[in-house]
Structure formats: C-alpha cells, structure tokens
Amino acid sequence: MAAWAWIPLPASDQLSGSSCQVPDMSGGAERLRILLIDDNPDDRALVERELRLRIAAVSVSHVADAGALDQALAAGEFDVAVTDYRLRWTLGTEVLRAIKQRYPNTPVVMFTGSGNEEVAVEAMKEGLDDYITKTPKHYPRVPYAVLGCFERVNNRLRLQESLAREKLAKARLEVALQSARMGTWQYDVQTGQLAFSDDIGPMFGHGHGFVHATVEEALLQVHHLDSGRVRSAWAGAIERDEAFAFEARVVGADARTRWLAVSGKAVGDGTGTRRIVVGTARDVTAEVAAQEAQRAQQEELQAVLDVLPVGVAISHDPQISEITVSPYFCGLLGIEPGTNVAQAVTGPDGEQPYRYFRGGQPLEPADWPIRVAARQGTPVRSEELEVRFNDGRALTILVNAAPLLDGQAAVRGAVAAIMDVSALKSVQRELEQANRQKTEFLSVLAHELRNPMAAISYSVEMLRHVATPDAIHKAREVIGRQTAHMRKLLDDLLDLSRITHNRIDLVLRPIDLRSVIEHAYESTQALLEAQRHRIAFELPDRPLMVLGDEVRLTQVFTNLLNNAAKFTPAGGSVTVAGAVDERHVVLEVIDNGAGIHPSELEHVFEMFVQGKGKASGGVPGLGIGLAIVRKLVELHGGTAQAFSKGPGSGTTFRIELPRAEEAETTQVRPGGHDAGKHGRLLVADDNVDAADLLGAVLAMEGYPVEVAYDGEAAIELAGRWRPDLMLLDIGMPRATGLDVARWIRAQDWGTHVVLIAITGWGQHEDRRATREAGFDVHLVKPVSPTEIVALIGKHLGAPHGDARHSRD
C-alpha cells in the first residue's frame, strides 16, 4: 500500500469551493499508475498535463486504439483507468466491462463530452467509479476524481482486509482452544508438598514432569505486575478456604512470558485432619493474544466505519421487526441513538420527522431496501432514495442492502448501508447546467461570428463586381464596422479568460469616476442614439474618487450602458446616478427596459448567461459582459449587484467601490522616442495578405514601408533598410519575431528602433517574452489599422507630406 503525504496546491491552481488536496508520493513512495484511454491525442495531453500538475508522483500510459488497450489489460500495470465514452473502436462502457472483468477492484473514471445522463447511469451500474463531463473547466477535476476513486477503493480493500484478519484471528483462537492442554496440581497444606501433572512444567518454561520444590518458588515466577493479586488469592485459599480463579503472567525458566489461567479450591482429605488445595492450570497465552488482536481489529473496523461517510442499519430477524442503526445514520436523519427505525419514526408531536421517496413517490416501509433484501434473499444495489424532512430539507441517499444468512442459507436478518449523495447530485445538476450553458454559448458564438463574416463576405463580393467610389466607401465602412465587432467579441473572451485565471494586471491610480462615465458614454453613444434612448446623468458636483484602473473601469460602465441599451425597448430611458459617502462611491445604471425575474438576479453575472430575448432588436451578444463587470469590480475591492422587480419593470445595476482621497491623476510619462520624428517602417509577417495590406495602409498614410514574410528576410532587410520602427509578427518561420528583436537590439543602430509586436499570442507569459526580447509595445491581433497608425504617430510623429489630409 502506498504511503500518502498531503501537500496543498497554490490557490490559483485549486478549484473554487474545493477542499481537496493532492497526494505527494515523492520521497520513496510508490507512483500512481494511470491508464489514459482516449483516441484524441490533444485530450490525452490535456488530461496528462492536469494529472502531472496536481499529482507529484504519477505515471501515465496512453491508449489510443484497440491493440494498445488489449496490451494494457494483459499487462495490468495500472492503478486507475480514465476513459472517454465514444472511442473510434468501441464505447467507454465496453472498456469499463473489460477492465472490471479482469480487475474488479481497479477504479475507472469516465471523462467524456459525448455521453449523457443515461450513459452515466448505465456505467455506474456496471461499476463505474466516477463520471465527469468533458469541458475545458472540468479538466482540473480529473486528478481529484482519480484520487478520490483510488482512495475509496483502498478504503474498501482495507475494510475487506480487516474483516479477513478478524476471521483469521477467530480461526486461530478456535484452534488454540481446541489444542490447549490443561494441567492439574495440588498442594498439601500440612506438608507443604506440591504435585503437578506433566503438562504444567512447560507452562513455567521447564520440561514435562517438572515440579517446584515450594509454593514460594512458583510464586517467584509470577510476573511482578500480577504478583500482588496472585498472592492475595493464594492467601485467601489457604487461610479462609476461598475458591479462586485468575489469569496471570509467569516468566518461564526459558525467559518467555506466558499467560496462565489458574483456578483452585481448598478441600479436605476426608479424614478431617488434612487440607489440600487442588486446581487446574492452562496455558492461555494464545487466547489472550487472540483476544487482544480481536480487540485491536474491532477498533480498526470501527475507526474505518467512523471515517467513512456511510450509515449502517442492521436487523437480526428475518421479519426485520427491529432495526439498529449506526451513529452516522442517526446523525444523518436527526434521530436519537438507539432508536428502532423498523417502523416509521414519529416525533414528540406524533408527526413523522422525515419520509422516504422513490422517483417522487412515497416509499412504504415494506418496500424499504433492507426489507426487500430480506424478503427476496438477494442484495439490493444502488437504490437511490430521497429523504424529505418536515422542516423543508431534503437529502438524496444511495442505499445498498443484503440479507444475512444462517448456516442453512436461510435469511436471519439483513444489513443496509446508506451514503448521502446530495452533494454529488448537486454537482451533477451543476455540470448538466454548465453543459447546457456551454452548448448555448457555442451556438451564440457561432451566430455572432457568422453575422459579421457574412457582411464582410458580401462587401468583398460587391467590390469584385462594382468598384465605384460609393461602393468602395460603403464596403470599407461595412468591413471596418464588422471587423471592430469581431474584435470586440475576441477581446471580451480574452478578458474573461484572463480575469478567470487571475492573469490580469490592474494599473491603479486615483481617478474621478465622472471621467470614466464620460468615456463609457462616448463608447456607447452611437448605440444609445440608434435606439433613440434618452440618457440622464445624476452625478454630484464633487469628484467621485477611487483607486482604480481607468481602462478597466471604463470597460465596466461601457458594458453596463451597452446592456441597458440592448435590453431597453427603443425610445426608452437610461439614467446614470452617483453618490459618495465616507467609505464608498456608489454608481447606478438604471433603465426602464425588459427587467429580470428576481430568481435570476444573481445568475446574470455568471458566464454565458443572458436575457432570453432582445427588447430592442440589437445583437444579443455572448452573455459574458456582466460576468466581466462583476469580476473587474471585485478585483477593485468592490461589489456589483442587480435589482429588478420583475419582467417589464426595468433593471438597476449598482456598482460600489472603495472611496479614495481626492488627488491629482498621475501624469503618464511620454515614451522614450521623440514625438514628431519621421522615419521608415518595416512590416514582417508570414501571413502574406496581412503583411501586404498593412504595408499598403501605412504607405497610404505617407510612411516609407518595406515588407518581409519571414524572420530571416526581416533581419536581412533591416540590416540594409535601417528602419526607425518595425511591426513584427512573433510566430514566423526561419526566425521568430523574438529572434528578430534580439538581433535588432544587438546592433549599434538598433537601440533606438521602435519595436511593436503584432501577434495572436496575448497571455502574460507572451507579453513577458516580448518585453524581455526588447519590444516596446505588444499588440494582440486583430488590431485595427487606425490604432496602428495612431501608435506609430505617437512614437514617430506624422509622416512627411502627410497624406492623411485626404482621408474621409
């Protein structure tokens, strides 16, 4: 059995609300061997990553086809199996049966995105130990499920081993009693002479036939811890003719300590002149040892039962007229220890404090699983019942029952074990809800991406047939607008990912929320005006100072205003109100729109949750804007709440942030490159279309531009061109953008070149890598040309012969 040591994970790697810890099997402990069965190599890689991340000592064997599975089953060198359900060559349930047939005690976890509740129930009946729906956020659950199943199986095996040891101890005790030899002895009080039978000598470590010369010589061999009571019993027999019986240890001549059961009584010789004490002695060393072992094993068994979250009920008659339950069972149902639960329990008021239900229907006492097992003489497996209490509480319990049989295989009683699976059922419901939300989100995401792509496609097709200035202008507006929409979708998804994984850095400084509201209004003004909404601002004259990230707080109120515009019928009203007290700044966005049912108010801040209809006919969105709002506000130490009296009554979103002392906003130090500097540009990207189009845009802005399509070409061109600013993709062939940046910074002329990374990689590690390579700016695709031109102007200034005067 492996020795388990427990080490806590960092908070960022733990599941929310979870108390599970990961075993550290380093330092000489055995490695946990896991068989990973999945025909998708990417899924296997993700699962293995989570396993290795959270289990210190683990070995993972991959199975991708039927041949590999047969070899793995033949070898049997695994402790836990993790399988997908829908495999190219078979189903996960068939894999489960194959494993359980050969290795019934090996835990199996099903981690799948293609199963359903019926598959899970069928697999559980076949012996599946755990079932997890395969979603991105549930990959971290796999190590915990593996460890939980492994621990449960170990506990079950330990229980079986304990029962086997107890059975063996009983057998040893019976053999010892049958084979024990009893010796007899007598003592003549008058002459002081002792007499032993042949079997007593070995009890004192001597040979057969040995007899002590005196009683005192025998008493000297009694263990010092027992000597006092043995001498007292002997004196009572000699002086008062008292019978005695005791068990005591003797230290034999062979230095071995034995337990002897000694009894005796003073009797006369029949003549009235002599008194003799007669008795028996028996070596009970084996019995005492067996009793001690049995006691220890019973303590171990009881400890195991106390640790396991299982209630036990037992009845010793075939009619099940009396049922005794364990303390855990009593605590689970709230009944007094010692209560006979064979009939419906009633409280002091005569009412039943709880009732059993199966499938929503009341369960009669005759149909309790323990009675069914006794009546039918067969076990009842995995019976799921609901316990409803009078106080409104409810439990879901899993019941297993089996008959107790006598020597003639007749039923003499029954035993049942119950487990509270309410939490598991709750998790199951949450997983099902999450799966439904995921499906809905993917559908909405597909819709949200297809719409702008369709508009862009139509614009491109129009340009193929019509190239008039009006057509070009219209196509450019459509493409720009729809590209901005798609970029907003991607930015929201990336922001939510960064916030969820705690990978967002806030730039905190004292700011006036009134300016934040102004910026948010500027961002949403077009949408509000398009819907003909009336907007009012009820803000105090004094500053609303908080310590915050201006960009992120602007994002918060932009999302709230967008939400109000989207779910308020055309011509509605939106109000932004603010107040300040000694400790907090409170802002409210109030609309008279669709409203929210009170039961759904807390759910609106969850991911992928949104209104069921569009009040204003606008784009429904992905359902993540309010999730971003709450998470950003909480990162600022504040709270976000929603209030509504119900559908049709409008909604109020309240943001409360810690107040900061009024202070001047920190001035941002200009960049290291002189404004007004005109220079040459170099664009490098292995996407030829993207590189050429960006180069063309910058050339139209009046900048001299060169374009390269891989890293080595960029280095060669930069050596000749000596650009003042370079826009580099990171993932280029032959040399990456990071390689190019390092080479530029190593040149004498390259220390003052402005380096801008334009890449699809935007994680914290990616930004750190570009910063360390020497980049000045890190932009995440897609980036609008307008933003790029503005950034270049910030670092280099307007180009000579500024061509932008002629732009619309």
Image: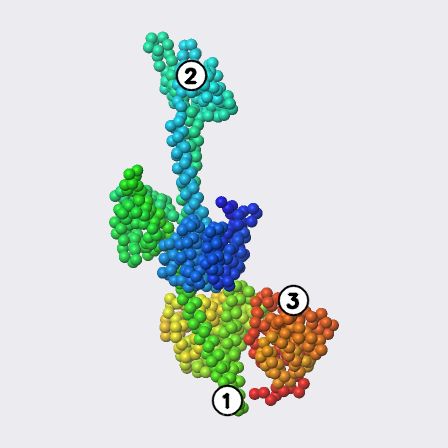
Amino acid at dot 1: His
Q: Residues within 10 Å of mark 2 (few under 14, many from 20)?
A: many
| Residue on which disc 2 sits | 196
Q: Check the picture and name the quadrant holding the C terminus.
A: bottom right
Observer-nearest residue: 289 or 457? Answer: 457
| Residue on which disc 1 sits | 465
Amino acid at dot 2: Phe
Q: Which of the two marks, 2 or 3, is nearer to us in this view?
A: 2
Amino acid at dot 3: Glu
What residue is rendered at 33% in x and 56% in y? 392
Query: Which numbered disc flags the more N-terminal residue, 2 or 3?
Result: 2
Query: Which numbered disc flags the more N-terminal residue, 3 or 1?
Result: 1
Q: Which of the two marks, 3 or 1, is nearer to us in this view?
A: 1
Observer-nearest residue: 482 or 83? Answer: 83
Observer-nearest residue: 462 or 397? Answer: 462
Tell me the SS state at disc 2.
Answer: strand
Image height of 326 relative to 391, above or below: above
